[in-house]
Image (spheres, grey):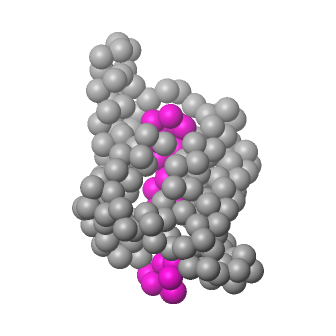
Amino acid sequence: MKEIGMENKRTFATVNLVLMALFAAATCVLAPLSVPIGPVPISLTNLVVFASAYVLGWKRGTLTYIVYLLIGLAGLPVFSGFTGGVGKLAGPTGGYLVGFIFTGAICGIFFERFDRKVVPGFIGMILGMIVAYAFGTAWFCISTGSTVVAALTICVFPFIIGDIAKMVVTVLVGPVIAKGIRRAAE
């Protein structure tokens, strides 16, 4: 896939900064939209993490998510359920907030290394979600005193189908977004 940007470095840097800001803003808008199904809600956070990794690659996509995370940690209500602050990171879902950093990096590496092909991209997204599930489940157990089996039942199993659907959306919509951005940048 052709790199997004222009022929000179200054324009290339500007385009990438704007794209990173747009994806950080998209995360701030979509992540708070959540459906509470227990202590861990269904949210669109990982969908934006997947999409930003697809379009921006692992470095810029991961940095974009970290910017979002810092905005939320500063207290702006950009986390699930329109919450924010350090307390959210310390709460039962804080492991997912940290785990998504690695999800973005892993997905982005797979998207870049394999030229955004569907099967390797899916493998990268699955591995990235496994890492997020591991961080989220471990922190949920620590913060609530739950057993691993109970945490998996609450924090992982109900989300697998929806997360796979978000992966499908990413491989279907990601190329369209990337093509539109390339066209606009020309």
- Residue 35: x and y, percent? 44, 81
Name the foreground residue: 87 vs 53.
87
On the rendered structure, is 25 left or right of 50? Answer: left
Residues rendered magenta in the picture? 35-61
x 58%, y 48%: residue: 102
x 27%, y 55%: residue: 74
Q: Quadrant of the C terminus?
A: top left
Magenta segment: does it hold 51? yes
Q: Is residue 57 visible?
A: yes
- Residue 185 vs 30, above or below: the answer is above
Picture quadrant where residue 113 is located: top right
x 25%, y 61%: residue: 76
Magenta segment: does it hold 43? yes
On the rendered structure, is 84 left or right of 56? Answer: left
- Residue 139: x and y, percent? 58, 67
Q: Is residue 33 visible?
A: no
Q: Main secondary structure of the magenta part?
A: helix
x 37%, y 57%: residue: 27
Picture quadrant where residue 73 is located: bottom left
- Residue 177: x and y, percent? 44, 46
- Residue 65 vs 79, above or below: the answer is above
Name the foreground residue: 2 vs 26.
26
- Residue 21 vs 95, above or below: the answer is above
Q: Quadrant of the N terminus?
A: top right
